[in-house]
Amino acid sequence: AQNQGQDERQRSRPDRAETAPKARTSAQNQGQDERQRSSLNDANSSLQAIHSQSGLDAFDTRGAESKSAKQDEVDDGKQMSALQRNFSGENLHQSGEGKSSHLRSKQPSFGEVKERSKHEWTINEAISVLKARDSRMHVEASEALANMFYEEPTVGIAIVLNGGLAALAHAITIGDATFCTGACALIHMLTSSNLTLKRCQSDASVISGDMFKAILDAMSKSSSNIELQQWGATAIWALVKENHRAKVAFMLVKTNQGESSLRVLKNALKDFGAESEGITRAVIGCTLALALNSVPSQKAISDLAMPYLMLDILAKHPQISFRGEFDNLREWLRDNSSRKEEVHRDVSFNERHSKKD
């Protein structure tokens, strides 16, 4: 009996000896896992804080779907409001042209505009009027095109194929800020349809740069008009998006005052970006669309120190999201965001692009 008891005690000792290290190892592993999870949480929190401070969170795809529907609704509402406001009867002539005080308290709908007009416009007639030097009928002609396209989107194909964009570009060159704002909204409206998007982007007035010059001259001339800055940049964004030939044409354009195309965009963002979410989204979206898949454009944008300005302004509008459209530019933005001063080079974009080709 004594021998049997001793044998049992001896067998139990190794079991306890093996169990103790296992228990200690398990506790150590559990502690390490907790520390790793804590470190990951701290790292994620720090990364989110950095993104929020620098404006890079605007390029996250997270939460993009929740913002997408609201943003589309807002964009559509602003587009229709701009069209109704600027293509509604008589032009508004003011000494302080370009200020947003020209907004009307009551805007007529497209149906009311059609009922008020005693003349039944055709597409070709409206386009011919827009090509004329006499600008007295430009508002009514543009209003008629907007009305026809609003009621039947397929009409947009005929508008573009019959020279509607070139006619609008001509009308913008001689129109006031109010008319130019509505014209840019109409151009953007035409590009919003899948039936007419590619036709607009490949139009001769776009590839030659005439459309961009007309819009940029209007933006530069009426630089204090907030709505014109927003809708001008919005129209340009739609035309250059994934359109290499249009990007090159835009970058080569200079205004009548000798300003570069990017300079006009930067001035709009610098003057109104902090206070206007619409201008921030339009100008930055347009600039990044130019930079996407274009090294010469990226170089020109970086030389103007625009990455720093864009991220600085975006940090003031955390609700803006580009829905992952410019994810490929995050590293480029981060690498160039430290430069605050512009770089003046002897080689122009035209020469750099020619050497690259």
Image (cartoon, rainbow, N blue to C red):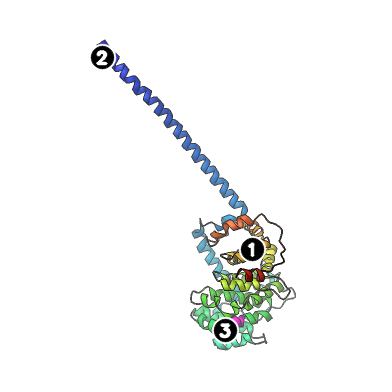
Residue named by callout 2: 4
**Residue 222 drawn at (x, y percent):** 71, 73
For the residues marked 1 and 3, what is the alpha-carbon distance in whole angstroms?
Answer: 34 Å
Residue 299 numbered tag: 1
**Identity of the amino acid at label 3?**
Gly
Residue sitting at 52 percent across and 78 percent down?
199
The tag earlier along the polypeptide, 1 or 3, is 3
Verify whether residue 55 appears in magenta: no
**Identity of the amino acid at label 1?**
Lys
For the residues marked 1 and 2, what is the alpha-carbon distance in whole angstroms?
Answer: 88 Å
Q: Is residue 226 depicted above or below 327 in this figure?
A: below
**Identity of the amino acid at label 2?**
Gln
Verify whether residue 167 appears in magenta: yes
Callout 3: helix, strand or loop?
loop
Is residue 169 toward the left or the right of residue 6 in the image? Answer: right
Residue named by callout 3: 163
Callout 2: helix, strand or loop?
helix
